[in-house]
């Protein structure tokens, strides 16, 4: 990646930006535009925003989320797939928790 300590990303040339995107792609990560599009699509659904809000303070079970939102667990798992796909939550067994990216979402976006 481009060394951001010496070159503010706002000041990157088109060539530097392209090099950065190539390196990002080599790591198997989606490009930033695609990542943003996927995250925006995932967060359009109010159920997914409610799930993130429920996780603000601690991890919680799929069953507790389902009970609180009055949905069946299968529906909750469907929504969790979207949140996992944009790296906002992890699912270990039946316990759901935020990732650092999910925490950043809650800190920076009003739900």
Image (spheres, rainbow, N blue to C red):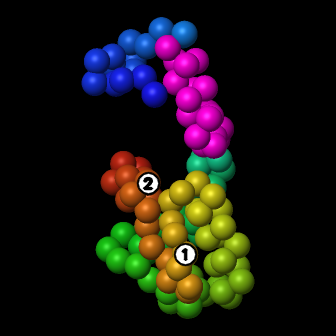
Q: Which residue is at a point 55% across and 75% down the rendered structure image?
A: 91
| Residue 28 lies within the magenta run | yes
Q: What is the magenta segment's predominant secondary structure?
A: helix
Determine whether 84 is above or below 95 in the image: above
Could you tell me which quadrant the C terminus lies in? bottom left
Q: How many marks?
A: 2
Q: Which residue is at a point 62% across and 34% down the rendered structure image?
A: 25
Asked if residue 46 shows in the view, the reply is no
Residue 54: mark in rendering: none
Instruction: Look at the numbered disc 2 and give the secondary structure of its residue.
Output: helix
Image location of residue 47, percent across then percent down: 59, 69
Name the side, left or right, on which 74 lies relative to 90.
right
Instruction: Look at the numbered disc 1 and give the secondary structure of its residue.
Output: strand
Q: Which residue is at a point 53% across and 79% down the rendered structure image?
A: 92
Q: Which residue is at a point 61% across and 70% down the rendered structure image?
A: 80
Q: Quadrant of residue 46?
A: bottom right
Please state which of residues 47 and 103 is positioned toward the viewer in this rendering.
103
Image location of residue 110, percent across then percent down: 40, 53
Could you tell me which quadrant the N terminus lies in? top left
Asked if residue 9 shows in the view, the reply is yes
Q: Which residue is mark 1?
A: 91
| Residue 2 lies within the magenta run | no
Name the side, left or right, on which 89 lies relative to 6.
right
Mark 1 Cα-neighbour bin, 10 Å: few <14, some 14–19, many ≥20: some
Q: Which residue is mark 2?
A: 101
Residues in magenta? 16-37
Q: Measure the alpha-carbon separation of dots 2 and 1.
A: 14 Å
Please state which of residues 54 and 95 is positioned toward the viewer in this rendering.
95
Image location of residue 13, percent across then percent down: 48, 9
Please state which of residues 72 and 23 is positioned toward the viewer in this rendering.
23
Q: Which of marks 1 and 2 precedes in the sequence?
A: 1
């Amino acid at each position: 990646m481009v060394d951001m300590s010496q070159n503010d990303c706002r000041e990157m040339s088109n060539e530097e930006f392209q090099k950065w995107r190539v390196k990002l792609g080599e790591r198997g990560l989606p490009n930033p535009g695609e990542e943003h599009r996927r995250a925006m699509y995932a967060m359009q659904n109010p159920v997914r925003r409610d799930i993130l809000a429920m996780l603000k303070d601690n991890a919680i079970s799929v069953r507790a989320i389902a009970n609180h939102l009055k949905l069946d667990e299968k529906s909750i798992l469907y929504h969790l797939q979207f949140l996992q796909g944009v790296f906002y939550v992890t699912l270990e067994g039946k316990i759901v928790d935020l990732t650092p990216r999910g925490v950043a979402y809650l800190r920076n976006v009003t739900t």
